[in-house]
Image (tube, rainbow, N blue to C red):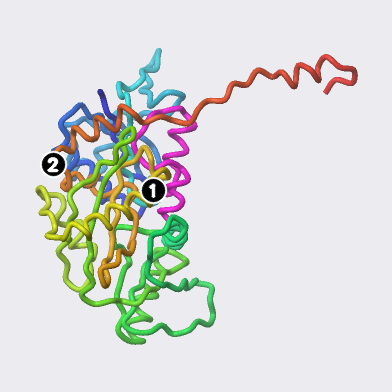
Amino acid sequence: MNFGLIFGGNSYEHEISIVSAIVLKKVFRGKLSFVFCDKERNFYLINPNKMNAKTFSSGAYKDEKQVFLKQGGFYEKSLLKEKLLDADVYINLIHGKDGEDGKIAALMEFFNIRYIGPRLEASVLSYNKELTKLYAKKVGVKTLPYTILKKSDKQYKEPKYPCILKALRLGSSIGLAVAKNKEEFEYAKDLAFEFDDEILIEDFIENVKEYNLAGCKIKDEMIFSIIEEPKKNELLDFEQKYLSFSSSTEAKEADLKDELKEKLKEAFVKIYDPCFKGALIRCDFFVLDNEVYLNEINPNPGSLANYLFKDFSVILQRLAECVKNEKSIEIDYTFLHSINGQKGKL
């Protein structure tokens, strides 16, 4: 099976998506075509030999073939004809805006292109951190209490310290900060508002246990990765999360009791099934007093969380074989024909 990998996008996480794609090229055992979406949302077919940081940072990607979307896939345009790219299934690897907010999902569905990634509803729910919490509550998974602060708010109640501030619609730990007093809060607030008009605020719990679990559903079988306990300092910030994964090897499984492992998997299934069917996602959980709380859903995790799986390429191949787009509706204009046959035609 031939795969197409879509990455880049008009997003604060644009460069992280490029790193993810380069990592996937190194680890995935299979045929991959690389479709880059630049900041203007033009698509380019990148030669695999040019999949390196310099190609993108220098702007050299613009010398590659430009491709465009039509029914059935991406096409190259030549002087006399159009050629369909040889990809059976596409992987949505755009992080943040464009990739995780539903735009790519909508395009894939609209143009009837098979793809691995969150569908439109799943994208919307996981992109907005407040909607994620509401969804988790609906399916029976606990989350931490929170408040929302809007940029337009002239007055607001000062939070309890320490607290953590997160841009409402942003991942990769960008703009995330811990405030231990009013001065730090004002700075963290202004920083987060650089990225979004709304901020989610939670109590910061020191030394909380955090675990990552990835997986997908293939036919009727849930496939789980190992459960990882990420290494962090005070919090898992941008540098810890991403400046190291470009050279990451297989992660080490957390030493957990079977009871807690099952609780984490049960929470993952509640989040995943059926809303995220067709995607390989990672959920980040907190554990407090042996209770599991959802921290966030990563619908397009960095480098597709390959480092959490022992047989990543095989799993991706199996998932690709069973992804389906929404059923096409047959339109035969019966109603309009009936109107046309009556007096007083429209």
Assign the C terminus to one quadrant of the image: top right
Q: Tell me which segment is drawn in magenta.
A: 101-127
Image x and y of residue 18, in percent? 25, 45
Determine the image quadrant of residue 82. top left
Which is nearer the eye, 102 or 275? 275
Residue 184 in the magenta stretch? The answer is no
* Residue 260 in the image: above or below residue 2: below
* Type of amino acid at the residue the image marks with label 1: Glu
Q: In percent of the image, x 53 and y 76: which residue is there? A: 153
Whole-percent x, y for residue 79 in the image: 38, 16
Label 1: element kind: loop
- Measured from the top left, where is residue 48 in percent x and y? 19, 31
Quarter of the image with the N terminus is: top left
Closer to the observer: label 2 or label 1?
2
Q: Which mark is residue 100?
A: 1
Residue named by callout 2: 310
Relative to 135, residue 274 above or below: above
Residue at image coords 22%, 60%: 260
Figure disc tally? 2
Say what amino acid the circle numbered 2 marks: Lys
- Residue 318 point in image, percent of width and height: 26, 30
Check the image and report above or below for 268 versus 187: above
